[in-house]
Every structure is written in structure tokens, then in C-alpha cells.
Image (tube, rainbow, N blue to C red):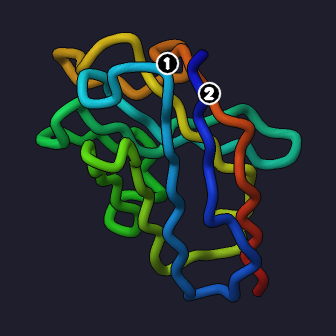
Amino acid sequence: QVQVVESGGDLVQAGGSLRLSCTVSGLPFGERAMGWFRQASGQAREGLACINSKGGFTHYPTESVKGRFTISRDNSKKTVYLQMDSLTPEDTAMYFCAAARIGWWYPARCGEADFSYWGQGTQVTVSS
């Protein structure tokens, strides 16, 4: 059974940083693309950052997080990370991690429909 578990969400002040972690079990982690998504209250889920199976390719489809968020992975720990800097209240949302069924796409993709296994989410709240 595949399990995807996010952690690291917290209440942080504007301008601060957080690092989210996501640990996966039940699938060959080192062979699968991973992604981070978020969903704010009343809004659709949006893709933030995706990374290929070996960590050599990344894709950030959401303009507002480019240059502030960084995705990385440690295949030895079966964990993917999302480093978030310069946080603003607009970053307040539930953050989700997801695993794909393949290692990557050409051209790069980072949409909700591209991922099959999802965690329950971790809440990030940014106060002004």
C-alpha cells in the first residue's frame, strides 16, 4: 500500500521560511517523479514544484513561487522537500505532496492529473 506523508507545516510570520518534507513508502521512490501542490480555501489545487525521479530536472508552473520555493529530494531517505522562503499571507494553504507513476515527462509537466498518489496535506499559515 502506498503511503505519502507530509510534514513541516506551521504558522509563520510574513517574510519567514519553512521546509516541508514528504516521505513515501510502498512504491519505488527513486523511479517516480514527485510534486508539491497547494490548495487555499475556496480555490483550486495548484501545482507548485515538480522534480524528476533522479532529482536532475525541476519544473515550477506557478509564477508566484518561482525564485522563492525550491523542490529537492533524497532518494536514500525516500523523501522530497519543499523549501519555502520569503513567505507571504497569500501562501497560506494546505500543501500536498504527490507521487507520479513515471519518472518524468518531456516536455516537463506538473499538473494535478499527472500524479496518482497523494498525501493528506500539511497546513501552512502565514501571518501578516
State the image coordinates of residue 88 (x, y, percent, origin top left).
Answer: 63, 75
Furthest-right residue in this view: 42
Q: Nearer the viewer, residue 71 or 41?
A: 71
What residue is pinned by disc 1?
Answer: 115
Q: Nearer the viewer, residue 39 or 7?
A: 7
Residue drawn at x 37%, y 42% is 78
Q: Nearer the viewer, residue 89 or 97?
A: 97
34 left or right of 128? left
Disc 2 versus disc 1: distance between alpha carbons?
Answer: 8 Å
State the image coordinates of residue 96 (x, y, percent, origin top left).
Answer: 63, 41
Nearer mark to the viewer, of 2 and 1: 2
Instruction: Look at label 1 and name its amino acid.
Output: Phe
Quadrant showing the C terminus: bottom right
Q: Is residue 63 above or below residue 108?
A: below
What residue is pinned by disc 2?
Answer: 118
Q: Is residue 60 above or below residue 15?
A: above
Q: Disc 2, disc 1: CB below 8 Å? A: yes
State the image coordinates of residue 27 (x, y, percent, origin top left).
Answer: 42, 19
Residue drawn at x 48%, y 45% is 48
Please tell me whether mark 2 sits on a helix, a strand or a loop. strand
Q: In terms of image quadrants, where is residue 97?
A: top right
Please tell me whether mark 1 sits on a helix, a strand or a loop. loop
49 left or right of 2? left
